[in-house]
Amino acid sequence: MLRVGVLIIGDEILSGRRNDRHFAHAVELLGRRGLELAWARYAGDDAALLVRSFREIKATGELCFSFGGIGATPDDRTRQAVAEALGVPLVRHPDAVAEIESRFGEAAYPNRIRMAEMPEGASIIPNPVSRIPGFSLGEIHCLPGFPEMAWPMMAWVLDTHYPALVAVQPAQFMLTIRGTPESELVELLERVQSAHPRIRLSSLPTYLSKGRFEIELAVRGEEKAAAQAFEALKAALRDQAEKFEV
């Protein structure tokens, strides 16, 4: 299964001048297809950092949705960074030129037309709002920073280029225990995970007060395997029930 990540770009995100909304939406959109984010990165508008980020992402071969930095102002550096990272020149994409000229006419020049410059070999991602397209090159898909534009464009990429990229939503079983720090569960959880390698076991502690903790334990995976692991987890917890509240 192809792993999916997001790269969210912009000094305004890192400075707190704008709150990121892309991460939560990507989780929700992928979840409709039974998928999960494998990773997420945030980066400012630093050219060298962006080039390094795209090189590393390209090397993984993983699917990446990049949000932001594809405008025409000096702080928009995504298209240049992708081109440099992948070792190709920037060229004016004829389909992007046609879209921008159709939308703006003579007002496309001299500045808006710069947004038709894309790494050589890229294909466009249609923008249903402004008609200024994003672009795809390999498994890297670059979208605007505006959620109203980026989100339908991300859905279009998934529907158009990855229609088969769907998975059965994993089953999840959960329980909560109290009265013990997480450290008391380490060996128990290791035994369960080792005995059931096909599932994912997670522990999420919450500090209540006066040294008391509440710990949410979750088992995720294919339904039969997850159910078996969850029963094993409950049995192991019962053996140590005197130490905490289940």
Image (cartoon, rainbow, N blue to C red):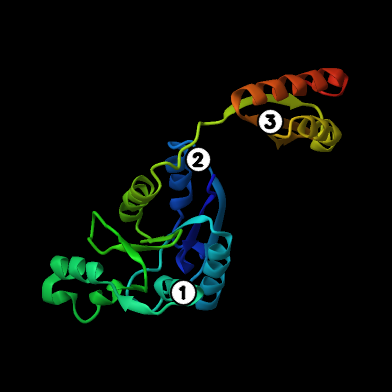
Residue at image position (52%, 74%) is 51
49 is higher (above) or lower (below) than 131: below
Q: Is residue 68 left or right of residue 188?
A: left
Q: Name the residue under label 3.
A: 216
Category of crowding for the residue at label 1, using alpha-carbon neighbours closer than 10 angstroms: few (below 14), some (14–19), many (at least 20): many
Q: Position of residue 166 (x, y in %)?
A: 46, 38
At label 1, the amino acid type is Ala
Q: Mark 2 points at which residue?
A: 35
Q: Position of residue 203 (x, y in %)?
A: 71, 36
Q: Is residue 68 left or right of residue 210?
A: left
Where residue 55 is drawn, which disc sits there? none
At label 2, the amino acid type is Leu
109 is higher (above) or lower (below) than 66: below
Dot placed on the residue nearer the N-terminal end, 1 or 2? 2
Q: Mark 1 points at which residue?
A: 81
Residue at image position (16%, 71%) is 101
Category of crowding for the residue at label 2, using alpha-carbon neighbours closer than 10 angstroms: few (below 14), some (14–19), many (at least 20): many
Q: Nearer the viewer, residue 132 or 148?
A: 132
